[in-house]
Amino acid sequence: MIDKLIKSQREYFAAGKTLNVKTRILYLKKLKKAILANENELCCALKQDLGKSSSEAYMSEIGMVLEDLSHHIKHLKSWAKPKKRKTPMAQFPSKGYLLPSPYGNTLIISPWNYPFLLSFQPLIGAVGAGNTVILKPSRFSEKTGLVMKKIVECVFPADYVAVICGVEGVSQQLLDYKFDYIFFTGGARVGKSVYEAAAKNLTPVTLELGGKSPVIVDKSAKIDLAAKRIAFGKFLNVGQTCVAPDYVLAHNSVAEKFINALKKWIAKLFPDALNNECYGKIITQKHFERVNGLICGNVALGGNSDANTLKIEPTIIYPADTDCPAMQEEIFGPVLPVIAYGTNEEMYEIIEKHRTPLALYLFTSKKSAEKEILSRVQFGGGCVNDVVIHLACSSLPFGGVGGSGIGSYHGKKSFETFSHFKSVLKKSNLIDMPIRYTPYSKLKDRLIRFFMK
């Protein structure tokens, strides 16, 4: 089946059927209509897979995909035009331009935590750039994967875009084939195997990984607002977010005040969490047991769970130790260690132990602190005085650095990620400058040096 599908997509692309920009826009419009038509079914699937309320499902997945689709439909025509570039005097008379071109046959492997968002956002970019796509959703978000397959099949021929929902091992089977571009979102361990498989065919990749994303709350921060926004971002999707605040570094002069404010906002936002229909669940029993195993030490709030519903209360560990289990790996659940720090150097030292996080969040009222910390720490992207919401800005490319990923996407950057920009120099047929041709002379040498300096 996979052999036949990949062959048919290669033939479809080779026939030039994805190249017309108007056709791409038409398919994106059809995709938008299909998503709207299946919105209720998507919400039900996300509820079954992750316990998401319909409001959270729309806000954090469906709505963001629709926004990105609208953005592509509006701007794709201009993005796809050749981009003029200046040429040097030595090449007079000539014109230079960059020609956006699709890579060809692409593979998108998506995760389970935001199964619709993290499948369809890269899909939009790949289709917009003129590629064919095989999309492999996570087997853990099975219900959402089936709805995505239904949506894609009612919009695209399988030769153009296909969704493969399968059991364990299907992703590895796909990686054994040669693709022209691979886009992977998931954990670093699997990301390494994807990178290794791509390297065998010199296939370019985007790797969207993760890491321990820190939150810094300095002594000038608006504590109550900081606590409210951190509580929202951390416990959204019960912490199963690649850019969720993973731990908090609070200045020791405000740490106690911050903890009290955080407890207050957790109580307001997630009351009776284990029985709250608006509070989600951990994806599988295995993940549930792993996250539960990270809860130890000074539990300042929460810590309870329900194995039957796979729910874990919003949990604060304070004061947390840098050697505690929750500080040894990316948590990916509703557990938040809070560490008090004294000096900036102490803060930097803790962050350096988990360097190049996918996100960094800083709460401060001082521009000098903002400038220093954002310059000094290496991270993929982030926010000042908020968390997580930088993902919702299509004008801001999203991606990691170092161990948190390679490449970026969102909005125009998605189109660019799935495009190769051919550099073209067009020379005039009317004039042919003789100085580049042999035999060379002192005059030619002087002219060459005049133009090329």
Image (spheres, grey):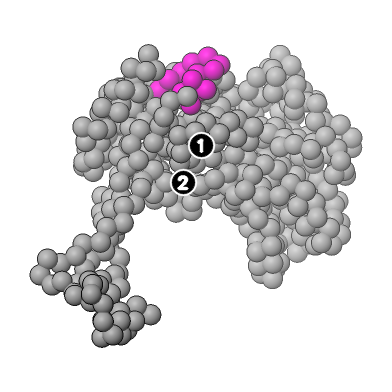
Which one is in front in this view, the residue at disc 2 or the one at disc 1?
Answer: 1
Locate residue 431, reporting x and y percent.
Answer: 13, 72
- Which range is magenta? 163-175
Tell me if 378 is positioned left or right of 17 in this view: right
| Distance CA(mark 2)–CA(mark 1) | 21 Å
**What is the quadrant of residue 404 in the picture?**
top right
In the picture, the quarter occupied by the N terminus is: top left
One can see residue 59 in this view: no
Locate residue 301, reporting x and y percent.
Answer: 82, 36
**Is label 1 in a helix, a strand or a loop?**
helix
According to the picture, the residue beneath numbered tag 2 turns out to be 409
Badge 1: how crowded within 10 Å, few (<14), some, or many (20+)?
A: few
Pick the residue in front: 224 or 216.
Answer: 216
> Residue 199: which numbered mark, if any?
1
Pick the residue in front: 359 or 355.
Answer: 355
- Compared with residue 437, is residue 223 higher up or lower down, i.e. above or below? above
In the picture, the quarter occupied by the C terminus is: bottom left
